[in-house]
Image (spheres, rainbow, N blue to C red):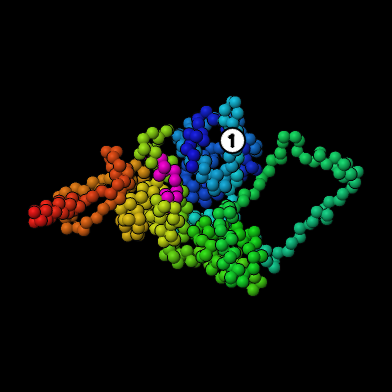
Amino acid sequence: MAQHWQELIPIDRYLVTSSGLLHEYDRKVLTFLYQPLIGSACLSLYLTLWAEIEENRLWSESSTHHLLMNLLSVNLKDIYEARLKLEGIGLLKTYVKSDDDGRSFIYELHPPLNPEQFFLDGMLNIYLYRKIGKNHFARLKRFFSDKQKPLDEEYSDVTRSFQDVFASATPGSVQYMQDHSEDLEAQHNLEFIGRQDQKPIQIDTKTFDFDLLMAGLQESLVPQKSLTKKVKEVISNLAFLYGIGPIEMKNFILGAINEKDEIDIEDLRKGARDWYQFENYDQLPSLVNRTQPAVHQEQVTEPKTQEQKLVRYYETTPPIVIFKELSGGVEPSASNLKILEEVMIKYKLPPGVVNVLIEVVLRKTDMKFTKGFVESIASHWARLKIKTVREAMEAARKEERSVKESKKTGKSSKKPIRTEVLPDWFDENGKDSSKEIQTDDNTELEAKKRAIEEKLKAFRK
């Protein structure tokens, strides 16, 4: 991911527009339904941009990002990070133009989903449920609901239709408008002020291997026509939401297909949800950052030393990518992914810190990623309230120093001989410590071997 100083500087100008009129009711939806997922900083940025648009208008005046920094009392990195989250959740679209006068942005605000769309979304509602819990979720559903109209047998619909009330008596004007249809449209470079309904979150269907899924379904005699566009969109969302691969998804589809060879979307969702909760002790997935949040990143404009570059790499790379690279390109197994998810959710470790943990565990355990060892480090770092990559690296170094000290005092003299491959950054003196580090037991063994060799030489003489 590009760094914020490459994407944004204080003198860059911006305009705010809206895809349609934003209503006052949208503030409640944003505050109670979106804020738990994206955080107060994102909500503050959205509301501030909204406030720059005059009432019943679609465009703001031009401003610099320096003004935005002063209005929000935050640095540019936090603004950039909040902007990305707003984009990801569908509340903002960003356009950029570069010319001789510099760089300028257009921030297009999009309205939130309406309450019914949100609570039936299939993704955002599940993340919210996991975030705030069952009781508060039920309370919010009541807050955004009201009594139905009392349409029972005691009431009759007596509403008049259009043609019952009005008559058309000017055929000449109708003909004129047909001949001059351009008069009906907005003038050049203008658009009518209105309101566009927000579309639900949709994961790109290209991210899911439908070819592999279809190959498995053909063996079970499921026709390809059952995978409609809508079904594929739901499958892509479920795969992202629950971390389901094509092979597992096949089983859920087989359980959701009816006698007409059609896939019941609700049954498909229920099957995936029930499976996930069974595998995760009745828990639902949480929405987490792919990379280290800006607030826990180092404020280094341009990394110079190798360690600064490594810190930046850990801060800007997702844990799954780190795991794969350290494993020689091998994809992490389902159990490995489950351990990573539990570490980030259960112990609330940021992605950058998890990256350090991954390297420490893989290096010290001969590329094994066992749950017990991972959790022992994760729980320790959670108690230490470690939030930054630098803190995690220092904690790992401190632990290694403690192990070495215990060996020097003879506490580990009876332990079996072993070698450890440690990350380069373990060596605080800048030496290449990626080579095998011999323990004190190895040194003692070498001394004994040399003594035996000397005795053999003397015996031969």
The amino acid at mark 1 is Val
Residue drawn where x is 69% and y is 40% of the image: 193
The region drawn magenta spans 311-325
Residue 40 percent coordinates (x, y): 47, 44
Residue 393 percent coordinates (x, y): 32, 44
Mark 1 secondary-structure assignment: strand
Camera-side residue of 368 and 284: 368
The image quarter in which residue 217 lies: bottom right
Camera-side residue of 408 and 110: 408
Residue 128 percent coordinates (x, y): 49, 55
Camera-side residue of 292 and 214: 214
Residue drawn where x is 23% and y is 46% of the image: 401
**Residue 120, visible in the rendered structure:** no
Residue drawn where x is 49% and y is 39% of the image: 2
Q: Is residue 386 left or right of residue 209?
A: left
Quadrant, the C terminus: bottom left
